[in-house]
Amino acid sequence: MSNDSRTSTTHLDHQRSEGAVGVTVLAGTLMIMIGVFHAFQGIVALLNDTFYVVLPEYVLAFDITTWGWVHLILGLVVAFAGASLFRGATWGRTIAVIMACVSMAVSFVWMPYYPLWSLTVIALDIFVIWAAVLHGRDIVED
C-alpha cells in the first residue's frame, strides 16, 4: 500500500499545471519582447545621438553611444533569458529573474532619457519576475 501512495504522489509531482505553464510562456514571450525593445533602444541610440534628450545635471549621465551599446547587449541577453524560460528548467527561471532585475535597474537609470518607456519596461519586468518565481515551480524539469 505504501508503494501505491508513493506512485500516486510521484505521478502528482510530475503533472504540469496548465495555468502555470501559460503564465510562464507569457513571461518568456514578454521577456523576449523586452529584449527586442532594449535592442531597438540601443540601435536608435547608436544611429542617432540626437534622438534622446540628455539632462545636463543627471548623476549617471553617460554618452548616448555608451547607452546604445548597453541596451543592445542587454537586449540580446534578456531575449536569451526569455527563451530559456520555455525550457521550464530551474536554471532558465533563475537566469530570467536575474536578467529581469538587471533590465529593471538599467531601465531605472535610463528613466531621465525616456521616462514613459522605462516605466513600461519596469512594469513588464516585475510581471516576468512574478511569473517565473511564483508559477515556475509548477513546471517539471525535463
Image: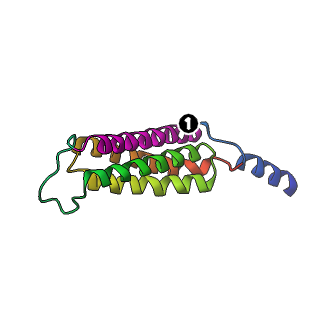
Measured from the top left, where is residue 84 in percent x and y? 58, 47
Residue ranking furthest to the bottom: 59
Q: Is residue 138 left or right of residue 65?
A: right
The colour scheme of the drawn protein is rainbow
Measured from the top left, where is residue 85 in percent x and y? 57, 46
Magenta region includes residue 129: no
Measured from the top left, where is residue 60 in percent x and y? 23, 61
The residue to which callout 1 is attached is 22
Amino acid type assigned to the residue bearing label 1 in the image: Gly
Residue ranking furthest to the left: 56
Q: Is residue 115 left or right of residue 95?
A: left
**Quadrant including the N terminus:** bottom right
- 29 above or below 135? above
Magenta region includes residue 47: yes
Q: Is residue 53 left or right of residue 101?
A: left
Q: Is residue 110 left or right of residue 131?
A: left
- 48 above or below 4? above
* Residue plotted at (22% across, 45% down): 115
Pick whichever, 39 or 22, lies toward us.
Answer: 39
Q: Residues within 10 Å of mark 1 (few under 14, many from 20)?
A: few
Pick whichever, 51 or 77, lies toward us.
Answer: 51
Residue 130 seen in the figure = no
Mark 1 residue element:
helix
* Residue plotted at (37% across, 39% down): 40
Give the magenta range: 20-49
Q: Residue 87's quadrant in the figure?
A: top right
Residue 30 seen in the figure = yes
Measured from the top left, where is residue 135 in percent x and y? 54, 47
Q: How many marks do you count on the picture?
A: 1
Pick whichever, 107 or 57, lies toward us.
Answer: 57
Per the picture, the main secondary structure of the magenta-coloured stretch is helix
